[in-house]
Amino acid sequence: MRLCFTSHVGFTKGEGVYYCTPGFAKLLEMIAPLYDEVELCAPVLDDPPPKNDSKVCIPNLTLCPLPPYHRGCEIAAFKYPLKLMRCLWPHIKRADAVLINLPNYLSILAWWVCLLQRKRFAIRMAGNWPEVIRLAFHNHGMFVLGNIAACPHQLLVKAIVKTSDVTIVNGQELADIYGRNNPHVVRVVSSTFHNTDIASTIAGSGFDECQILYAGRLQLDKGLSELFQAAKDLLAEGLKLRILLAGEGCRREDIRKEAEELGIIDRVEFLGWIAIEKLKDIYRTCDIFVFPSYSEGMPKVITEAMANGLPVVVTNVGGMPSIVQDGKTGFVVPKKDAPALQNALRKLILDKPLRQRMAEVGLKRSHQFTMEAERACVKAALQKFGLLSHTIKDQETKQ
């Protein structure tokens, strides 16, 4: 079978091969073996490959370049809708099945082409698009406008989901929103690691001061303000801790300034963007992983941290509460609640045996969230709704 996969994720070209973000490269590695041929329609940029991007070398995958329409703004897809639809048309037409990566504006155009051709298609949804839009306005104090802007996006996503043959979501929150009374919505957990990548022992810094790691984009909606406030109060109690921030983002300087204003900048270390292959070493030298975000699908760093032997503290948004067992593999706290985050971190900092017990349970649980487990779930869903032949064998099996 031939799959046409449409995605907004940008690629770059260097030395005869293509590069993309490590997370998307892992997704391709998971999806491609399910089909005989995969045509990936994605924008290709003229920029040199970023140093942290991954090389894409998948034998049965062909990249079909789209114009780099979204430089600086994804909504630019609607500046050239007919041009992009003409680019997508032949690839979707000759495919046996189509997989659309949602949410983004290119996905709307791909959806229209599928409807016009009456082509069977699947949706892969990795985040709550309307909520992200709402938060973007709220962060600038435009609460009413944010609620107004989110409504049409919510209706649009529901229409796309309703017309798809199957929608694969990566969090319980998305399953609750779009899967109610819809058996064609299937929840899976996105992964970036194999069974063989799971650590055999728990992590730990070995330092007197507790090393608390956050890995992700440096944005205001990631809950770093609450993390800094919690850290300030814990330091005032006399506890020893250090916060490590792995990642980059447009609000890095604002976040640094906030740490300075709270007087904890000497306890915060900005590690910058860490390649996925090297991030494992960072996990292994820390004591606690924290991800206090306001809105998520299912961030892969949560399962990565568990697979590397760390107890985790997350907020009750997206798919995180369905992954983290509160009180067993870590703690789940309300979003935007610095005192609750502080209490969870205090328990873990003061009780090393508790950290170890939670880390051990997390290691065992992480076997449920490997790339092999994700592929099995996706394969079953695609077969159930007719977008994958029951007789096809994975490319890995053929090899």
Image (spheres, grey):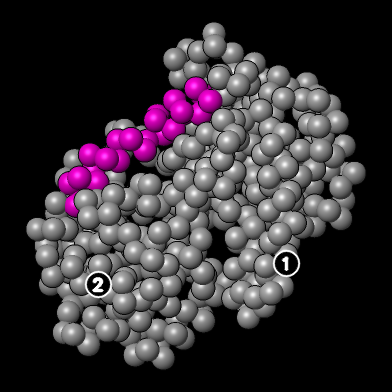
Q: Inspect the magenta stretch and tell me whether residue 360 lies in it.
A: yes
> Which residue is under mark 2?
343
* Residue 246 can be seen in this image: no
Vertical arrangement, residue 112 with respect to residue 252, above or below: above
Residue that protrudes farthest toward the front in the picture = 181
x and y, in percent, of residue 99 in the image: 65, 32
Magenta span covers which residues? 358-381
> Which residue is under mark 1?
148
Classify residue 317 as left or right of residue 290.
right
Picture quarter with the N terminus: top right
* Residue 49 can be seen in this image: yes
x and y, in percent, of residue 97 in the image: 68, 23
Secondary structure beneath disc 2?
helix
Vertical arrangement, residue 207 with respect to residue 371, above or below: below
Q: Main secondary structure of the magenta part?
A: helix
Residue drawn 64% across the image and 41% down it: 101
x and y, in percent, of residue 393 in the image: 50, 13
x and y, in percent, of residue 356 in the image: 14, 54
Classify residue 102 as left or right of residue 252.
right
Residue drawn 69% across the image and 37% down it: 162
Spatial distance from mark 1 to mark 2, Cα to Cα? Answer: 36 Å
Residue drawn 19% across the image and 65% down it: 348
* Mark positioned earlier in the residue sequence (1 or 2): 1
Quarter of the figure with residue 238: bottom left
Vertical arrangement, residue 260 with respect to residue 316, above or below: below
Foreground residue among 132 and 287: 132
